[in-house]
Amino acid sequence: MSKLKERWHELADIKDELAERDWFMGTSGNLAIKVSDSPIQFLVTASGKDKRKRTDEDFLLVDESGRPVGETQLKPSAETLLHVEIYRKTKAECSLHVHTIDNNVISEIYGDQEAVTFKGQELIKAFDKWEEDAVLRIPIIPNHAHIPTLAKCFSSHLYEDSGAVLIRNHGVTVWGRTSFEAKKILEASEFLFRYQLRLLEHKPNQLFKVV
């Protein structure tokens, strides 16, 4: 099996699993996985597709600028430039972007602080934070309608080969050195967002401050 086909199936399996969680409402969200380093090429979800279905047109191959490689009628996802920045600046192999109610509400509650911070939570270990007093800070950036501007703002938070960034009232983008790591970070992020919302229901004053 060629690497392209192998990566295609790898990304399709992730898409199927996330679709079962109902994380692709209204065709939202996009996924990407790197196929080659030199030149940079990666598979990304095609725009406007129902991600709950598995078809031969779910993904297309794009280059380091986010342009399709070869002739195709498919259009890359609107946020492809975010994935471009990830693969340009990190050694990540997979990046995932989903819109959920939980991550949107969290991004609005903490948007003015420009980050949501978690401490003392077991699942921050998914971010390779193992110290007993470790703190996880997930940045929140403005939802710029102009995608190049959004990508530039997003890029300023790409310091490591794995991580997560919230876009205010838009969604979360995560990346990892493998598809397994990216999915792990996404699942951990969504758990933390839901946990924090439940906590606020019972302790309205429990707003973690930016560290």
Image (cartoon, helix red, strand yellow):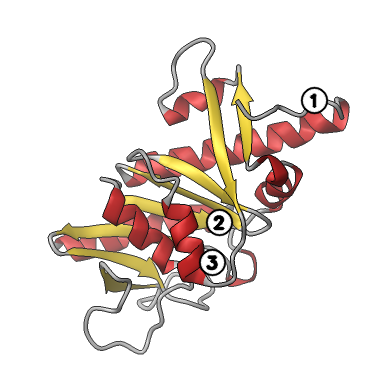
The quadrant of the rendering that contains the C terminus is: top right
Q: Position of residue 200 (x, y in %)?
A: 81, 31
Q: Position of residue 45 (x, y in %)?
A: 41, 69
The disc at residue 206 is 1
Q: Position of residue 2 (x, y in %)?
A: 14, 63
Which residue was labeled with disc 2? 98
Residue at 32%, 40% (x, y): give it. Answer: 161
Which residue was labeled with disc 3? 52
Q: CA distance from mark 2 to mark 1?
A: 26 Å
Q: Amino acid at mark 1?
A: Gln
Asked if the residue under mark 3 is in contact with the one under mark 2, i.e. CB atoms within 8 Å, the reply is no
Q: Amino acid at mark 3?
A: Arg
Foreground of the two, 134 or 28: 134
Residue at 30%, 42% (x, y): give it. Answer: 177
* The quarter of the displayed image where residue 118 is located: top right
Query: How many numbered marks are there?
Result: 3
